[in-house]
Amino acid sequence: MTEVPLKAITGGGLVMIPLIITSLVIWYLIIERLTHLRNEKMDMEAFMSHLLMFLEQNKREQAHKLCDLTPGPLSRIIASALRVIEKRRESVERIIREASLSETPGLLKNLSVIGILAAVTPLLGLLGTVSGMVTTFRAINLYGTGDPEALAGGISEALITTQYGLIIGIPGIMFYFYLSSRTDNLIKDIDKQILKFLNGVKQLHK
């Protein structure tokens, strides 16, 4: 079972080295992003409903505790706003904007790297294809077409690197779009709940 992958790696030439490294990096970043999104998952609707209820009942301590016990970027943003909730609405909005900006890089972290690496791997495979064809033509110049073994090495290198470039790149691109979509939806949901929070704070200040 291990012979075929090993032969593929050695038969693909030097281009297989960056392909393998790129593959390991892509999958490490994909797993990191999936784990991060899972850890940040929260029921935003329920969180905001309980939070506004505590604020309406003037239970500020419970509201702070709710934010501390709830994971996710929304709870951290709201926790920052609660520290200045007694101030004017403009101050609360400013703090929320600043907290949101500080949370955004964490949500988008490594997404662009995944996309770039996933796009590069087919090109590395193409580079291996060109390298393999060059090897093949060199063998033809040296031995003619009468030595199949000499030709097989270059052709094998060309096909293997193309195959692995696509095998690595296609799932990488699919996960990039999946993770980007999940992150965009998460940011939209956060913005929606922040607006609900600000409307609730507006009612409290009346």
Image: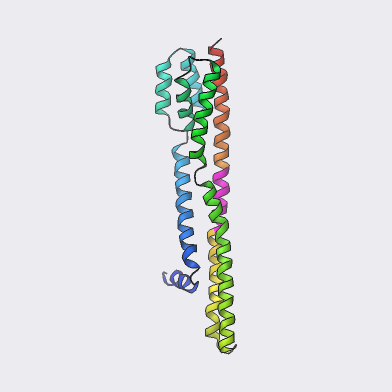
Q: Residue at x 45, y 29 (%)?
A: 76
The residue at 58%/28% (across/down) is: 192
By secondary structure, the bulk of the magenta-drawn segment is best described as helix
* Quadrant housing residue 183: top right
Is 58 left or right of 169, judged from the image as shown?
left
Q: Nearer the viewer, residue 114 or 5?
A: 114
- In the picture, the quarter occupied by the N terminus is bottom left
Quadrant assignment for the C terminus = top right
Q: Residue at the top extreme?
A: 206
Image coordinates for residue 115, horizontal then vertical, percent = 56, 51
Magenta residues (range)? 169-180
Query: Is residue 46 shown to the viewer in this render?
Result: yes
Q: Position of residue 196 (x, y in %)?
A: 56, 22
User: Is residue 200 on the magenta stretch?
Assistant: no
**Is 177 above or below relative to 133?**
above
Q: Which residue lies at the image location 43% right of the left edge and 16% below the top edge?
A: 60
Relative height, residue 133 to residue 107 (above, below): below
Q: Position of residue 7 (x, y in %)?
A: 45, 73
